[in-house]
Image (cartoon, coloured by chain):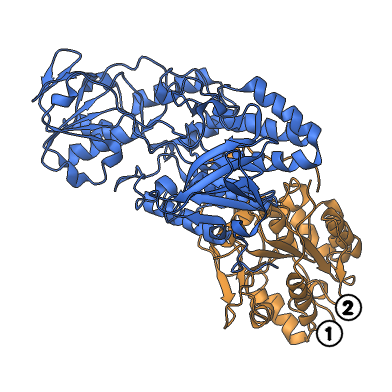
Chain colours: A blue, B orange
Amino acid sequence: MPTPTEHGRSDPETTTLAHSRDGRPVSDRGDTVCVIGAGASGLTAIKNLTEHGFGVDCYERETGVGGAWNWRHDRSPVYASTHLISSRPFTQFPDFPMPDDWPDYPHHSRLLSYFERYADHFDLRRHIWFGTEVVRVEPVGDDRWDVTTRSTGGYGPERTSRYAAVLIANGHNWSPKLPRYEGLEQFRGEVMHASSYKDPAQLRGKRVLVVGAGNTGCDIAVEAAQQASRCWHSTRRGYWYAPKYMLGRPADQVNDTLLALRVPLRVRQWLYHRMLRLAVGDLTRFGLPEPDHRVYETHPIANSQLVYYLGHGAITPVPDVAGFQPHSVELTDGRRIDPELVVFATGYLPRFEFLDAKILGDDEGVGRPRLWLNAFVPDHPTLAVAGLLQPDSGLFPLAHWQAVLFARLLRLRATRPERAAAFAARVRSGAGERYSGPVKDSTRHWFEVGHVDYLRALQRALHDLEGTK
Amino acid sequence: MNGERVRVVRGWEWARPVRPVRREVLSVLPELEEGQPPLLFVPGFGHGAWAYAEHWLGHTAARGFPAYAVSLRGHGGSEPAPEATLRAYAHDVVQVAAGLPRQAVLVGHGAGALVVAHALARYPARAAVLVAPVLGGWATFGAALRRNPLGTLPAVFGGGLRLSRRQLFSRETADADARRHAARLGRAARRAQWQLLTGADPEPAVGRPPVLVLGSPDDRVVPASALTRAARRYGSAPLLFPGMGHDLMLDARWREPIDAILDWLVKDPTRGEAP
């Protein structure tokens, strides 16, 4: 039995040297797979690839695991009060459950301890090069990849290793998306993106405008309602604010009971509208606009407290921002308000700065790759992206199954090449497929998937690949 | 077990999580951490963690392996759970296994081996050992009915399955010990008992762990043919200990099977065949 303390990670410099196109020395890592990032998706990739017999080198720019969920990391978007918005059964890895005495919606610090335990339990840290960032990933023919790394922050020499496959798990919630507004440069108040919001003390006693009705925007609006002297919440449209509990159970478990019973979408929407009407009533009486879509057509907002504070008058709902003056903000309905602090909870965009955008099929370079199952890259069978999803549920189980599928694909490339070829054809024909009902088309919903639709498609892909029909 | 389908969409498991309960976990840890994987022992129906605490836990730890034993809900010192199903039992095992510091080896005895087989589909164990496994089905029932009609028949009508001393222990086991152990036996939940007969087969094991099957040809609960069948399912042959009763861990010769298990682990069994 291999002892977990032994070092499975061999030094790349001891392996045979090859040369890259421009003559730099490259250490050939043979059949080893490179994983970029040791957040939730990266960790599950290491675990599943090693379980399938692959050697793994994982590069992590930070010094700990957990990625976005590690609040010590400078790219982490979590704030002091971040809690899960999907309940435990939807959030845990399918083969490593969270303790069942944890609350339904654990705090982000618990989630970090969960990832740390996952890493220790499966002895994953020995595969991870901490404090190392990936500078370049280049295809070198024969479906292999040259990965160039250096110490985080640009210190030390670059070094290049050649891998049989690359799995990108660099996260997509760290590069802030900031909308353009007229006059924003002249605005004298404080402006911040939600990524730099950490603690409610930043809001205390101020007049605060929160822009954006994502889950983060709603959380910050609620904290502003508790801490700030005034809170405006600006949203582009009316939304459905889903309570975290319904019928005495976590709301997502109620919804999945209906999904397991295969209740059609229209009926589920009707039931949901009905239930919300009974529990909360008409939201327009708080001054909110009527939603212009049915529930499940935008990313769900799970927030029980927003409506509560609207009812207390602690949050004033306002429409979209039209522009900024030095001392005031103009709204699209012509009103003017005078916040001291504006928080843009306007989301994030994915970035793959180490990779030519064309490889991922993002020809215009807007940050929207063209992939199958949001993971597999046409014409590059040994490259995949993990976790580039925004599910209406927890992300980690989806990332787990992506890693399993990628590992089995890599294994079949050696043993059953004809199956791998059929898979590649499927990737080409299916690139860009969506896995949800109709959703609003905005950058916010680029990666939106329904968790059941998505996992059904992935399960089909897995069974087709293995020929177990 | 090859070629079986992995189930990715688990709607009912997400929508209806198993009720959490307080679980009894007994453990004996080696004095010196030697980097060996922890073993988690799972008792069969009616037994609790106490069955392993008698001899096996201490011996395992003495040989350098951290040793843990869980009482399934409704058994031993765990919270009562008359409504428990096989899924709830497997949940208990996975919860305890995932709570251990390192990837564990699961060891299941009797119907506990079936619980382990189900748990293997939800937790990537480092290896698994099935001791005198009762993997369910009508053949098991037939054997039990022949050997102990009075104890088995009530179970059909929702009563408790009673196992006699003669079924569980060999003649070599001291009568006083056998009496003492038999007095501690409890019973499994009615639904779980039924699922032993009618339940679905376990889903494929995660990560294809190596599986060792062992038992006694003189076991009066599990016939030798059932051992061979169980071992064949995992692509091997059973390891046999003639002359022992069903409860190998409480038998007078308890040392032989546990030493065989630990020797097998030390030898580093390779992972199961790729599909």
In the image, taking residue B16 as reference, residue B242 lies left or right, namely right
In the displayed structure, A210 sits above or below B243; it is above
Which residue is rendered at x = 55% and y = 28% of the image? A360
Observer able to see residue A428: yes
Q: Which residue is mark 2?
A: B243
Residue B172: numbered disc: 1
In the depicted view, which residue is nearer to us: A25 or B192? A25
Q: Nearer the viewer, mark 2 or mark 1?
A: 2
Q: Position of residue B196 (x, y in %)?
A: 75, 53
Q: Quarter of the image holding residue B23?
A: bottom right
Q: Amino acid at mark 2?
A: Gly
Q: Amino acid at mark 1?
A: Glu
User: What distance separates the C-alpha of mark 2 from that of mark 1?
Assistant: 9 Å
Q: Quarter of the image holding residue A295?
A: top left
Residue placed furthest toward the front: A23
In the image, taking residue B249 as reference, residue A224 lies left or right, namely left
Secondary element at image label 1: loop
Q: Position of residue A144 (x, y in %)?
A: 66, 39
In the image, taking residue A56 as reference, residue A414 lies left or right, namely right
Q: Chain of mark 1?
A: B
